[in-house]
Image (tube, helix red, strand yellow):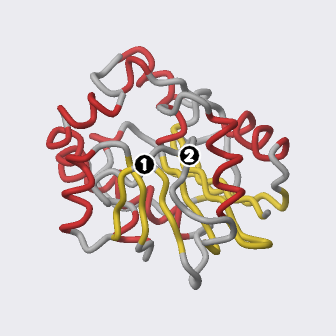
Amino acid sequence: MNNLFNKYHKKYDAWYENNRFAYLSEVEALKKVVPKKGKGLEVGVGTGRFASLLGIKDGVDPSTQMIKIGKKRGLNARFGFGEKLPYANGSFDYAAIIITICFVKDPKLVISEIRRVLKKEGRIIVGIVDKNSFLGRYYKSKKSVFYKNARFFSAAEIIKLLKKAGFKKFITYQTLSMLPQDIKLIEKPKKGFGRYGFVAIAGKK
């Protein structure tokens, strides 16, 4: 999968410009659950599109081409995999994994690793395209170069995985009421999940 993102890193990064209002709407939903203070990590930081707007300075990704772009955006981006994070126990106040969860080989192990690198009462943030939403169904049927091999999750499934890993006190916000290409303004995020395409989920260690 990392070879795929190496090969299409420019196509990946261009999506955020071509669908700018959808992207910024997702950022607004994530801002509702990302702590205002503390040291943060993004697992699957990619080209740094989310981290750079969320105040996250550290990131890890298996795509060397994407890391290069992330570094240009001022991030401390490192090569690595979510299944074996290159950080010591209790290194971060919070950690985000945005969209990436649907591409990893072992979601349970990645979540466990994120919990390991979090401080006591640290927060995990998961951003997903909800498979039960209109957008999830659209991406599954479209079978794009990125999503054709993705494993989609529902918000309820992610919360269940987080609970099993020992997380609690969940907060959820949702956004994207239309297909990304049809959104012409930044949407205000709504609490909960089940109505819109993108969901930001946070839980506490």
Instruction: Give the spatial CA distance, label 2 vs label 1.
Output: 7 Å
- Which amino acid type corresponds to the residue marked 1 in the rendered image? Gly
Determine whether the residue tagged by mark 1 lies in a helix, strand or loop: loop
- Asked whether disc 2 touches disc 1, contact meaning CB atoms under 8 Å apart, the reply is yes
35 versus 84 height, above or below: below
98 versus 154 height, above or below: below
- Residue 185 position within the rendered picture, expressed as x and y whole percent measured from the top left: 32, 59
Left or right: 116, with 176 as reference point: right
Q: Quadrant of residue 91?
A: bottom right
On-image quarter of the C terminus: bottom right
Label 1: few (<14), some (14–19) or many (≥20) C-alpha neighbours in 10 Å = some
On-image quarter of the N terminus: top left
Label 2: few (<14), some (14–19) or many (≥20) C-alpha neighbours in 10 Å = few
Determine whether the residue tagged by mark 2 lies in a helix, strand or loop: loop
The residue at 62%/41% (across/down) is 195
User: What residue would you read off at disc 1?
Assistant: 80
- Residue 191 position within the rendered picture, expressed as x and y whole percent measured from the top left: 67, 58
Q: Residue furthest bottom?
A: 37
- Residue 127 position within the rendered picture, expressed as x and y whole percent measured from the top left: 54, 49
The residue at 38%/61% (across/down) is 50
- Which amino acid type corresponds to the residue marked 2 in the rendered image? Lys
* Count of marks placed on residues: 2
User: What residue would you read off at disc 2?
Assistant: 84
Q: Nearer the viewer, residue 52 or 27?
A: 52
Left or right: 63, with 140 as reference point: left
